[in-house]
Amino acid sequence: MTSRTPSPDSSPSKDAAASSLSRRRFVAGAGAVAGAAVLGTTLSACAGGGTPQATVSVPPNAPKGTLALTKDVPVGGGVITDGVVLTQLTEGTIEAFTAKCTHAGCTLSGISREAIICPCHGSRFHLDGTVEKGPAETPLEKVAIRVEGTNIIRA
């Protein structure tokens, strides 16, 4: 009778250890991927959603205190620049508000679907600064501006 002895490379305990190690790596990798997905979703939620902000392009020779050019503020929308929300409900009517939420003082993050968004607690403001959705209860504070030619200037 011949007996077969297992070779050192094919012992059951080594196969089990290798299998266990690859399972361990797989589970750890899957956990890392899931964690990254959750973190990415959470961070994008904090960003306030909404549409990307329009670019504000103030030329270097613009008068002191210029916040934006009139062409930078879309009709039916707005932009946030230098701590000020600029909106244009109708052609040629530009309004300005402080970019701080009246609920808890958070910095407003963007303008989406004709609303000014607060990322902290979900308050939304109409483009005229009035509250659309709480928890904020008071409208945004107005900022004095003047329009000179195409320049929107803090008054």
Image: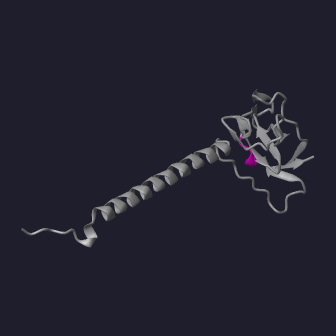
In-front residue for pair 10/1: 1
Q: Give the prevailing secondary structure in the magenta stretch.
A: helix
Quarter occupied by residue 3: bottom left
Magenta span has 95? no
In-front residue for pair 37/92: 37
Quadrant in which the N terminus is drawn: bottom left
In the image, residue 50 sits, relative to residue 133, either above or below, namely below
Q: Residue at x 90, y 57 (%)?
A: 64
Q: Residue at x 71, y 52 (%)?
A: 55
Drawn side of residue 71 relative to residue 84, left or right: left
User: x, y (%) of residue 11?
Assistant: 27, 66
User: x, y (%) of residue 155?
Assistant: 93, 46
Quarter occupied by residue 116: top right
In-front residue for pair 29/102: 29
Looking at the image, the residue that sits furthest to the front is 1
In the image, residue 48 sits, relative to residue 69, either above or below, namely above
Residue numbers of the magenta segment:
70-74
Q: Residue at x 75, y 45 (%)?
A: 79
